[in-house]
Image (cartoon, rainbow, N blue to C red):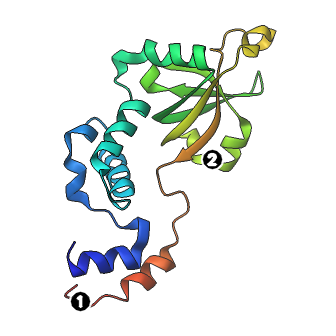
Amino acid sequence: MSELDGKIVRVFGEAAVEKSLARLEVVSRLPRFIAEYLVSKYYRKGGDWVSLVTQVVHEYYPDPKDRELVLNKLLREGRARLIDEYRVSVDLKRGVYVLHIPNLQVYNALADPSIVEKYERILSGLWGVGVLEHASWITSQPNLATFQPIMLVDFEPFQVYNLDLKAFIEARSRFTKDE
């Protein structure tokens, strides 16, 4: 790492991204900003970061053809973590939040209301790691019987949710024009 790269990481912390590393084949299926986030996160930890990124992508972002394997894991283990662009819509008639999970081709699961309250942008789509639970109780409720027995119970967004522009301006002021 060059002296300037080191300064960038010290000043900007986790907001600094080594973009050239995000060209790895293992992250090529992911949107570029997600690949950059994952690579930067594990690159800073040192060690065999490529293996860590490979493991995370393999485990949490399965190929769409592996849909049934993920659903099987959800059924057997009761929980699954998945990287995806989660989108929630509001069903006023039933008073629920309907979850769309594109990678699994599931468009009728449910989301915990606290997630929508905390990350309102999920209503227009938000990339992150979601924790899905097999919620068999859903199908036993007459007004919910048409929904998949899947509930989004936890969510960690990848996208910057609240950007502190003043902090970026202050950090940038610590660099010369040449830097």
For image coordinates 37% across by 54% down, the residue present is 42
Instruction: Give the camera-side residue of 12 and 86.
Output: 12
Instruction: Give the camera-side residue of 101 and 90.
Output: 101
Residue positioned most to the front? 47
For image coordinates 45% across by 26% down, the residue present is 102
Question: In the figure, residue 145 lies in which quadrant?
Answer: top right
For image coordinates 74% across by 15% down, the residue present is 138
Q: Is residue 68 left or right of residue 26?
A: right
Q: Is residue 126 visible?
A: no
Residue pointed to by mark 1: 177
Question: In the figure, residue 136 lies in which quadrant?
Answer: top right
Mark identifier at residue 120 = 2
Q: Amino acid at mark 2?
A: Glu
Question: Which is nearer the N-term, disc 1 or disc 2?
Answer: 2
What is the secondary structure assignment of the residue under circle 2? Answer: helix
Q: What number of labels is visible?
A: 2
Q: Quadrant of the N terminus?
A: bottom left
Q: Amino acid at mark 1?
A: Lys
What is the secondary structure assignment of the residue under circle 1? Answer: loop
Q: Is residue 47 left or right of residue 167?
A: left
Q: Is residue 177 visible?
A: yes
Question: In the figure, residue 31 lies in which quadrant?
Answer: top left
Residue 52 coordinates in the image, percent (x, y): 35, 44
Residue 165 coordinates in the image, percent (x, y): 48, 74
Instruction: Give the camera-side residue of 91 and 119.
Output: 119
For image coordinates 22% across by 54% down, the residue present is 21
